[in-house]
Image (cartoon, helix red, strand yellow):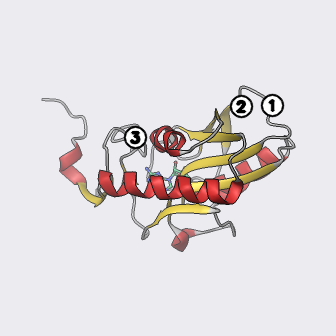
Amino acid sequence: MSDQPHPQDRTRVLIPAERIQARIVELAREIRADLGDGPLTCIGVLKGSFIFMADLVRALDGPVRCEFLGVSSYHGGTRSTGVVRITEDLSHPIEGHHCLLVEDIVDTGLTLDYLRHFLEGRKPASVHTVCLLDKPGRREVEVAPDYVGFTIPDEFVVGYGLDLGEFYRNLPYIAVYSP
Ligand code: 5GP
């Protein structure tokens, strides 16, 4: 028998796949309504946002560029270390671009705060932020994403890109993980 975690063992569905998809369509409409229909550089934060990014860019009308930033902050546990490290930089300059930073979840806010400043240093025309999930109860720095998919309570979640020890990212829904 394998000792790999099994999705049904310790998870319960918090946000079903259909609700996520419906919310992404709404978010894409809101974003285009606010930011206009010009070129938009979407910057996905790896690895957690890769599925959200893929669905969001397909829901966005108009010209979209896709970039990724590799970031490491959790090192496999369920609590943030507070240390943000860039593990993979953008592949093109974003100077003069209208940018949308695409995050999976905002928890303490340290990652979003760090990345916003990091991107602003590259002289974009603008930086807006969207996160699929927001846990406002755990903020350590005052940051508010411009667009939020769902506000959730302070529970550790997995699925739809979010992992625990690199597992569970493939679940099509968001689930609460209870050890
Ligand atoms: P922050 O810097 O806001 O504390 O955390 C941001 C990062 O921590 C997210 O991009 C995500 O990778 C990770 N994170 C925060 N909360 C959770 C959670 O409930 N589940 C998972 N899997 N990762 C989380």
The residue drawn where x is 58% and y is 46% is 73
Q: Quadrant of the C terminus?
A: bottom left
Residue carrying label 2: 90
144 above or below 72? below
Residue carrying label 3: 165
Question: Which element is circle 3 on?
Answer: loop
Residue carrying label 1: 93
The residue drawn where x is 43% and y is 46% is 162
- How packed is label 3: few (under 14 Cα within 10 Å), some, or many (20 or more)? few
Q: Amino acid at mark 3?
A: Gly
Marks 2 & 1, CB-CB < 8 Å contact: yes
Mark 3 vs mark 2: give the one in front: 2
Q: Position of residue 42 (x, y in %)?
A: 64, 41
Give the Cα separation between the discs numbered 2 and 1. Answer: 7 Å
Question: Which element is circle 1 on?
Answer: loop
Q: Decide which of tag 1 and tag 3 comes sooner along the chain.
A: 1
Outermost residue to the top: 91
